Every structure is written in structure tokens, then in C-alpha cells.
Amino acid sequence: MLTIIENILDDEQVRSFRQKLETAEWTDGAASAGTRSVRVKQNLQLGRQDALAVELGNIILRKLGNDPLFVSASLAEKIWPPIFNLYQDGGHYGTHSDAALMRLPEANMTIRSDLSATLFLSEPDEYAGGELVIEEHYGAQPVKLAAGDMILYPSSSLHQVTPVTRGKRICAITWMQSAVADASAREMLFDLDQSIQSLTPDRPHDDPDIDRLIHVYHNMLRRWATV
């Protein structure tokens, strides 16, 4: 399931991020790639413990924690600190898959990557190329969103970033372990929750049908959650 979440960052926050990232100390992104991925990865990144990366990453994490659509779609239990990357001058990331288990030594924590996320910080007309292409059941899906918007997609999918032939593509990426590991179960819970959310405004506060749907949702979540 691919889920687009709009306005994780508003226009003012995007401008603030971009101004700060203009003077960032970018390093070779190949340093964080696996033994196979390093052969197809050409970009720049901020170090995970870079002070600016930590500052901006914490803002993103707070925004995600307060976004109802993100919470509903991900049911995130653990989230990897966001990583900021820059693609320019032909930079790209060839077809690859994300590591299933990701170790964060400073937090003494291991994350099972159920979902990946890309938060776009450059507007689509600022660069040519640079599409995030995600392979799913219905074929390869190219994604290029407005600045401040995010896409969630399965970490198990093959995906790539096409070469940036003009301008700069700046994004933040992260991974999360969901409380519900099974993707099909998580999708059913998401569909049910979204239906409840859409029906609730038109129903009385004590509507028994809505209460029953909420009851079903939480019993399904209780059955499938791995926490």
C-alpha cells in the first residue's frame, strides 16, 4: 500500500528547513549503504548524529506523532531518526531493497523495517528527474511530491531514485516498525479506521453503530499487534 500524506511540513517550515540545509555539511551517502547498495548509490547525506540533522529530524518526528493519517496508516511502534539526503549532478540510487533489520547503537535499539517514508523538501519544478520509483503489484509507480508532503511505502518493495539531471532534490527519509507486522492486516485496519473517521462527523456522539465499529477495530488490532 502506498499512502501519500500531505503537509507534514507547512510552507513556512519547508522554507526554514531549506535555509538551514543550504549551509549543511553534506557527506558521501555511500558510507551508509550496504555492500550491494553502495554500487548503485550516488548522493549526499547528513550524518545521523549531525546537530542539524538531529534538530530537523526531531521536528519531523513530532509532526508525525501528531498526524492522524500517519498514525492510522503506519501504527508505528518505533521510528528511525530521519536521514536527510541530496541528489544533484546525475545523483541517483539504483534499484534496491531496504534492510529488514536496522540497528541504532546509540539507542540500543533494533528496528524491523516494515514501512519506509520519503518526505520531499524540494518542489517538483526545482529539479528534473529524481522520481522515487516503487515497484508494487500493479507495476512501477513513479512518485514526485510537493515540498512538505510524504509518501509511505512497504520497506519490502524494490525502489529507486532516478538520476537528477537538473537542480537539487532534497528529502528526508525514515523507516518504521509497525505494531502490526502483517501488511495485509495493517491495510485492513487502516481501511476500517478511515471509514470510521469519515462516518463519525455525521453521526450522534453516542451512535451505537460507530461504537460497534470502534469495538471491532480495537479487537482486530488486539489480535494482530505484536507489541
Image (cartoon, grey):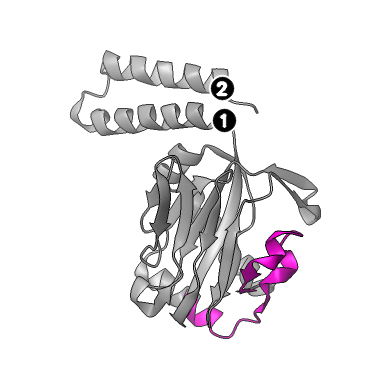
Residue 167 place in picture, x, y as percent: 44, 82
Q: Which mark is residue 180?
A: 1
The residue carrying mark 2 is 224
Q: Does any portion of residue 178 appear in the rendered image?
A: yes
Crowdedness near tag 2: few (<14), some (14–19) or many (≥20) residues, C-alpha within 10 Å: some
Does the magenta segment cover residue 195? Answer: no
Residue farthest to the left, as pictured: 202
Q: Residue at x 34, y 33 (%)?
A: 194
Mark 1 lies on a secondary structure that is loop
In the depicted view, which residue is nearer to us: 103 or 21? 103
Q: Quadrant of residue 179?
A: top right
**Is 102 above or below relative to 164?**
above
Residue 172 place in picture, x, y as percent: 54, 64
Residue 196 place in picture, x, y as percent: 32, 28
Mark 1 in CB contact with mark 2 (< 8 angstroms): yes
Q: Is residue 142 left or right of residue 227?
A: left
The amino acid type, in three-letter code, at marker 1 is: Val
Residue 79 place in picture, x, y as percent: 61, 48
Give the extent of the magenta segment.
18-44
Does the magenta segment cover residue 30? Answer: yes
Ranked by sequence position, the earlier of labels 1 and 2 is 1
**Is 70 above or below relative to 203?**
below
Residue farthest to the bottom, as pictured: 23
Q: Does any portion of residue 167 appear in the rendered image?
A: no
The amino acid type, in three-letter code, at marker 2 is: Trp
Q: Is residue 66 left or right of residue 87?
A: left
